Each structure stands twice: as structure tokens, then as C-alpha cells.
Amino acid sequence: MLNRTVFLVCVGVVVLLGAVGIIIAWKPEPYGPQLSAYLLKSTLQSVVSQLQGTDIRWAVSFGTLLGLVRDGDPIDGDDDIDIVVPRRYADQVRALMTDAGFEVNLDRADITQFRDSNGVLIDFYYLNETSKSSNYDYCVVWEDLPLKLEPIATLQWNGLTINIPAESEQFLTDNYDDWKTPTKDKGIAGKDNSVKTRATC
């Protein structure tokens, strides 16, 4: 009888330790529609915290900008964070992010893509510096789509100051058309659902 009791106790302890190990090792899936918003918030907070206190000129763009302006949060179901910076900060961005533990997933002249420990991607788009009329702004044609950085405005989100392009709503209209209406399709499309082409900024 005693041996049976000891055996059952040992089995219970093993099961309990196994359950504790599973809980400790568990991480939310990075791309599922139920959890991606949670992970994107965490990643955005981490990235912004790294950028604050540096002299890097930056702003969120694309889907990250869309979510923050329209919904007040990253878009549930999105899979990355989009940041634009002038090209002259590229080396500084690489050093900052890798020192903070982000893994380089893609590195080209026009973009560096990092991955965090949860698998969320962070795209840093590097902008060419161009002079336009009386204003000095940064602009790049990314797959024939204009990205603009200057002038920079800010919004408050989760206790953080987020940099956004001052002409955010115009940018969203140019690139997403009816951007105020959520859609299940990800991407930048014209009214005919084809990708817009823009020759210049």
C-alpha cells in the first residue's frame, strides 16, 4: 500500500513539474490574429524605448502608422513594425538594434529587417535625402511608393511618444485609399486593388 502511495505521489510530482515547464517555456504565436496585436504592442514599445534618447530621426510608417492613427494600436493580424529613418542613420540603427538583442533578418541598402525573440519583424526603411521647394524633407521611392518623414509630428501611445509624419492622413490616403475602413487584405492597393505606382515623391 505504501509503495502504491509513493508511486502515485511521484507521478503527481512529475506531472506537476511538466506542467510548470510548459507554462514557463510557452510563448504566444507571433502571427496569429488573436495574439499578434499583443506581440506587436510589446515589440513597438521595445523599439521605441531603444530609439528614444538617441539623435536618430525616425517615424512609424505603413501598417504601423495606419494602426496607430486609425485604431490607436498596432493592427491585429499584422506581422511587423514599420519605421522610416534617413539613410545616414543606417549604421547607427544596425548597431543600436543588434546591441539590444534584435537579430538581423535582412540587410540591404534600402532596408534592414530585424526579428525579436518572439519572431516579430521590425522593418527600418532608409530614406534618401532630397530638397523640395522651400522644405527639406526625406523621401524614398520604395517599390514606387513615396515614404515621407519630415516634418515629424508625435502622438501619445501607452505612455510613449511616437514619431509620425506630420502629413500622416494624406500619406495614408495616398497609399491605402479608404484607410479608415478596416480590411482583411494586407498591402497597399489602389481602388482597383492593384498596387499603386508613384514615380516620384
Image (cartoon, grey):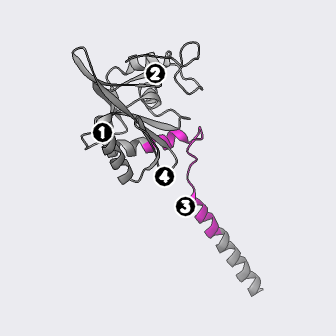
Nearer to us in this view, 169 or 150: 150
Mark found first going from the N terminus, 3 or 1: 3
Mark found first going from the N terminus, 1 or 2: 1
Residue 149, image x, y percentages:
32, 27
Residue furthest to the front in view is: 109
Q: Residues within 10 Å of mark 4 (few under 14, many from 20)?
A: few
Instruction: Give, as a single range, the part of the protein colored magenta.
Output: 16-43
Instruction: Find out whether the residues at labels 3 and 1 contact each other: C-beta distance under 8 Å.
Output: no
Q: Which residue is mark 3?
A: 24
Q: How many angstroms separate mark 2 from mark 4 (CA)?
A: 32 Å
Nearer to us in this view, 21 or 110: 110
- Disc 1 residue type? Tyr
- Disc 3 residue type? Ile
Nearer to us in this view, 86 or 193: 86
Q: How many angstroms separate mark 1 from mark 2 (CA)?
A: 22 Å
- Disc 2 residue type? Asp
Label placed on residue 89: 1
Instruction: Find out whether the residues at labels 2 and 3 contact each other: C-beta distance under 8 Å.
Output: no
Camera-near label (2 vs 3) is 2
Query: From what the image shows, is residue 93 above or below residue 188?
Result: below
Q: How many angstroms separate mark 2 from mark 3 (CA)?
A: 45 Å
